[in-house]
Image (cartoon, coloured by chain):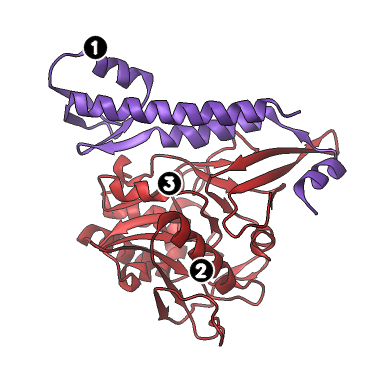
């Protein structure tokens, strides 16, 4: 039974996702002891590679998705099932900071597919869960997905392709804006369709996905390559003024939504 | 700039409530264990129930709401070990954070 992690990294004009993937892959090797397969395109791959991935899959990036800050090459995540060489795979966003072996627990869950349905924000306890729209249901998160090579998992990824190709249609049904394709929304819909329009509790990772959200920055406490201690700073707006607040965290995985902050965290 | 200078220059205050919430998030998830085809939380209720029963096998509802027949002793040992280890780490980290101002 082979196990490994899969990362997608297509460099955009603004961000070097390959660089992010290298750091994340090293941390996956170190903390989870798993090999990492990278899905990328030939333009993103540097001539001289400082890190040896277990496998590199060259694919074509779908460059049709746009976001407020520019082009976002996030489409095509449905190919994860096809590209993963492992029997059991953890599919991660490249901006997910692995600081512990916690994700290994997902392999022990009695399911062949799972992802997060609950999030919490560092220094922002009680933040509302995201919904597709006020008339729809809670979003699942594509940031961390564990899947095994089974018929059902394959169906979910095939369905994700179908949802991606018909995103505007689903946006009309569920009342969200379709201008930007989001894997989170696509995965929410695909999982529900395959499971008879329900989300089985077994398909949910039984702990929260920890986000570093807006007005929040994370700083390394030291420059060790595998540092796990951070200071989190939050700009608390009160009566028109910012009050800086902080906490210290350690050995805790988190997802950095602000790419600039993630790039700062991984810079030498 | 190191983080100590950053905190001092920004005149940032340590937020105890956020620190508490972070610890709860972190250690709650560590209390979850998979065993005997079920998913369990090493909490007081489950440990107490397993302790007061005297049958070798009992049927419990796991965190996925499925009834699972388990070897009581085996699960009890695992949950007690998990509970003790996680609570000790939680307590230690909480003591470190509590001393911050």
Mark 2 or 1: in front is 1
The hue used for chain B is purple
Q: Give SS at disc 2.
A: loop
In space, the residues marked 1 and 3 are separated at their CA atoms by 31 Å
Where's residue A2, x and y in %? 27, 64
**Which color was chain A given?**
red
The kind of secondary structure element at disc 1 is: helix
Does any portion of residue A171 appear in the rendered image? no
Quick check: A46 above or below A156? below
Residue B70 shows in this picture: yes
Disc 2 to disc 1, C-alpha distance: 52 Å
The residue wearing badge 1 is B52
Tag 2 residue:
A74
Is residue A35 rendered to the left or right of residue A265?
A: left
Looking at this view, name the residue that lies furthest to the bottom.
A47
Q: Is residue A128 above or below residue A266?
A: above
Please indicate whether residue B88 sits to the left or right of residue A199 in the image.
Answer: right
Location of residue B27 in the rendering, given as x and y in whole percent from the top left corner: 48, 33
Q: Mark 2 and mark 1, same subunit?
A: no
- State which chain disc 1 sits on: B
Q: Earlier in the sequence, mark 3 or mark 2?
A: 2
Return the mark for residue A102.
3
Residue at image position (50%, 86%) is: A42
Say whether mark 3 and mark 1 are on the same chain: no
Where is A82 relative to B69, above or below?
below
Quadrant placement of the C terminus of chain A: bottom right
Give the mark toward the camera: 3 or 2.
3
Q: Residue at x 51, y 72 (%)?
A: A9
Residue A28 position within the rendered picture, expressed as x and y whole percent measured from the top left: 46, 60
Residue A236 appears at what percent x and percent y?
A: 76, 38
């Amino acid at each position: 039974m082979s196990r490994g992690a899969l990362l997608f990294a297509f460099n955009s004009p603004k961000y070097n996702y390959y660089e992010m993937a290298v750091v994340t892959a090293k941390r996956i090797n170190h903390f989870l002891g798993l090999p990492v397969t990278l899905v990328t395109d030939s333009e993103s791959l540097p001539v001289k590679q400082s890190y040896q991935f277990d496998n590199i899959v060259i694919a074509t990036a779908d460059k049709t998705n746009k976001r407020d800050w520019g082009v976002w090459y996030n489409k095509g995540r449905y190919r994860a099932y096809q590209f993963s060489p492992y029997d059991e795979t953890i599919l991660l966003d490249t901006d997910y900071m692995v600081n512990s072996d916690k994700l290994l627990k997902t392999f022990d869950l009695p399911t062949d597919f799972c992802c997060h349905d609950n999030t919490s924000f560092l220094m922002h306890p009680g933040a509302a869960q995201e919904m597709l729209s006020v008339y729809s249901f809670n979003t699942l998160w594509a940031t961390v997905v564990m899947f095994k090579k089974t018929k059902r998992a394959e169906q979910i990824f095939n369905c994700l392709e179908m949802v991606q190709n018909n995103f505007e249609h689903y946006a009309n049904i569920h009342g969200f804006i379709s201008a930007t394709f989001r894997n989170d929304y696509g995965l929410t819909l695909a999982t529900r369709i395959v499971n008879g329009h329900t989300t089985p509790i077994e398909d949910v990772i039984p702990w929260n996905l920890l986000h570093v959200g807006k007005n929040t920055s994370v700083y390394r406490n030291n420059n060790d390559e595998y540092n796990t201690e951070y200071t989190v700073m939050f700009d608390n707006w009160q009566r028109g003024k910012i009050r800086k607040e902080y906490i210290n965290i350690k050995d805790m995985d988190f997802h950095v939504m602000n790419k600039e902050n993630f790039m700062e965290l991984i810079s030498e | 700039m190191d983080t100590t200078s950053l905190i001092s220059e920004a005149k940032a205050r340590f937020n105890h409530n956020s620190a508490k919430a972070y610890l709860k998030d972190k250690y709650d998830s560590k209390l979850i264990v998979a065993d005997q085809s079920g998913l369990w939380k090493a909490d007081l209720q489950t440990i107490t129930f397993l302790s007061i029963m005297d049958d070798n096998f009992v049927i419990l509802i796991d965190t996925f709401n499925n009834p699972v027949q388990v070897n009581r002793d085996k699960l009890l040992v695992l949950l007690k070990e998990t509970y003790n280890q996680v609570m000790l780490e939680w307590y230690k980290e909480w003591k470190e954070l509590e001393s911050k101002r």
